[in-house]
Amino acid sequence: MNYTKKQLESIEKVKIVFAEYIQNSRTLDLLWSDKLGYILITGITKNMDDFVMHPEVITTAERLCDQLLYEIACDVLESRGHCHDIYISTPLEKQLILKAYQPYMSQLPEYSHMLERHFIDPSKR
């Protein structure tokens, strides 16, 4: 992937804002490949006992931010004992998810337009 300087700077900014989350996550990682660029791997299992990983070449900062926010939302639901799509979250779950987003989005206001999208049924977007 040949990123433009602007693309790379934007991705790096998102990476820095989410660095602690990425580092501490047990289900994802962000890697650099000289051939492909940034690769986000999600679906890493606790014991690495099942192949469920989903690698994605990250081409934009918005996509990276969107996917990391989605992962945070899933973490919030999981912490409450739920494993359902975030678009069917209860009002309380939605409130907790938005609260979990706040430390990141306060540093990335340019992506705030993405927040509500997570709570809309994909078939109705």
Image (cartoon, rainbow, N blue to C red):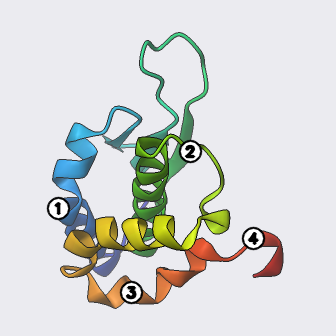
Residue in the picture at 24% in, 60% down: 15
- Secondary structure, mark 3, is helix
Pointer 3 residue? 112
Asked where in the image residue 125 lies, by quadrant, the reply is bottom right
Residue in the picture at 58% in, 79% down: 117
Residue type beneath disc 3: Ser
Pointer 4 residue? 122
Residue 40 x, y percent position in the rendering:
43, 47
Residue in the picture at 28% in, 78% down: 105
Q: For residue 11, say whether it is visible.
A: no
CA separation in Å, label 1 and label 4: 29 Å
Nearer to us: label 1 or label 2: 2
CA separation in Å, label 3 and label 2: 25 Å
Give the mark, 4 or 3, whose residue is nearer the N terminus: 3
Residue in the picture at 28% in, 88% down: 109
- Residue 16's disc is 1
